[in-house]
Amino acid sequence: MAREFSRTDRVSQQVHKEVASILQNEYKHRVGDMPLITVSEVEVTRDLAHAKIYVTIYNSTEEEGKRQIKQLAEFQPFIRSILAKRLRMRSVPHLHFFEDKSIIEGMRISNLVSQTVAADDAKRDTDESEEKE
């Protein structure tokens, strides 16, 4: 019988969970003033040597986001050493951080749709009230 999840899927889920915990607990205390960072996805290569970690940085400008990604890359050895203690693997994947803007972009588009619907409703209400007069 085939396994439900491949090993890379299971490793990526575990790395996702542990890196999110590390960022929330250890990394935040080392860096100090930091915007809200969420791990949105982790992709692990088939040979388990590299992990692409996509993070969403809330309430930040474009340059602030780039600075946070650069800072995460600088702290990568620290994060990887803590990850090595938590995972039961022979070798821990090298971590590569990327900014994921899809959640923020989705929220922006949702707000635009809501504003458009509200404007259409307001226009329809004014048209109906003019027709009654």
Image (spheres, rainbow, N blue to C red):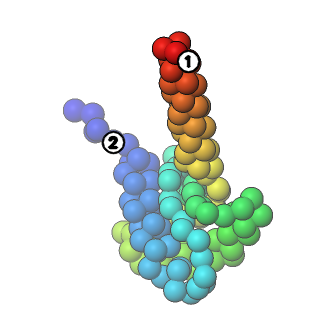
Toward the left, the furthest residue is: 1
Amino acid bearing label 1 = Glu
Which residue does the image show at 60% across and 44% down from the upper left?
108
Q: Is residue 68 left or right of residue 121?
A: right
Q: Residues within 10 Å of mark 2 (few under 14, many from 20)?
A: few
Where's residue 48, x and y in %? 51, 55
Q: CA distance from mark 2 to mark 1?
A: 61 Å
Residue 43 higher or lower than 15, as above or below: above
Which residue is located at x 50 percent, y 51 percent? 41
Amino acid at circle 2: Phe
**Between discs 2 and 1, the one toward the N terminus:** 2
Could one spot residue 54 in this view of the protein? yes
Q: Which residue is mark 2?
A: 5
Q: Which residue is mark 1?
A: 130
* Residue 64 horizontal/vertical position (percent): 72, 67
Q: Nearer the viewer, residue 45 or 107?
A: 107
Taking the view exactly as shown, the residue that stands out farthest to the right is 63
Asked whether the viewer can see residue 66, the reply is no
| SS state under label 2 | loop
Q: Position of residue 9 (x, y in %)?
A: 41, 47
What percent of the width, then of the height, locates residue 105?
Answer: 61, 44
Query: Above or below — where is 119 with respect to 20?
Result: above
SS at mark 1 in the image? helix
Quadrant of residue 37 within the rendered picture: bottom right
